[in-house]
Amino acid sequence: MRRIASVIFLSTLALMTPACGKKKPRLSAEPPARVTTLGINAYLWRSALDTIAFMPLAQVDSNGGVIITDWYVSPQSANERVKVTVTILDTELRADAVRVAVQRQTLGATGWTEANVRAGTVQRLEETILGRARDLRRNAIAPVR
C-alpha cells in the first residue's frame, strides 16, 4: 500500500512540476512494457488469466504472481487430466518473465498416475501468454486522432 501511495505521489509531483522552458517529451505510440499496480507485470498477469480461463482455478496470488489451476479433464479425453501453474517473475514484459509448469495424469486400473507432458505443451502455453500480453500492450493505448 505504501508503494502505491509513493507512486501516486511521485506521479502527481511530476505533473505539477513546470517544464522550465523545455520541450514536452513526445509520447510514444506504444505504452511502456512495465505497467503494474501489482508486484508483477499487469499485461502478463491478464494474459495468463485469459489463456487458462477455461480451467478451474485453485489458487491465485497477484502479489506473488502465481496462478495454479485445479485438475482439468478435457471432454475429448476423460482418461487424462492436467494441472497448470503459471508464475509471473518480473514487472517487465519479457520472454523470461513468465514460467509455466504442467502436470499430467492418466487414469488407469489403479487410479490416476503421473504421465509425461506432451512435447511442446509448456512452450506453446508460454508463447500464447506472451503473444496475448503483447497484444494487450499494443491495444492499451488508444489511436491518436
Image: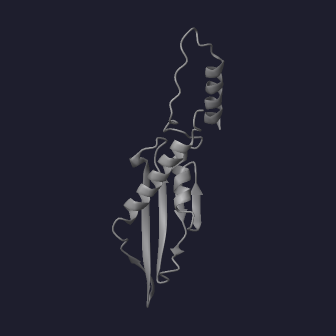
* Quadrant including the C terminus: top right
- Residue located farthest toward the left when viewing the structure as drawn: 119
Question: Is residue 109 shown above or below 45?
Answer: below
Which is more toward the observer, 91 or 121? 121
Question: Is residue 19 shown above or below 125?
Answer: above
Residue at image position (47%, 72%) is 82
Which is more toward the observer, 102 or 128? 128
Find residue 10 and report its horizontal and vertical position in percent.
61, 25
| Residue 128, picture quadrant | bottom left
Please indicate, yes or no, whether residue 40 appears anywhere in the rendered image. no
Find residue 120 and report its horizontal and vertical position in percent.
35, 65
Q: How is the image coloured?
A: one colour
Find residue 142 and report its horizontal and vertical position in percent.
59, 38
Which is more toward the observer, 24 or 143? 143
Question: Is residue 15 shown above or below 32?
Answer: above
Which is more toward the observer, 88 or 128? 128
- Residue located farthest toward the top when viewing the structure as drawn: 21
Taking the image as shown, residue 14 lies to the left or right of residue 135, namely: right
Residue at image position (52%, 21%) is 25
* Quadrant including the N terminus: top right
Find residue 123 and report its horizontal and vertical position in percent.
37, 60
Residue at image position (61%, 34%) is 3
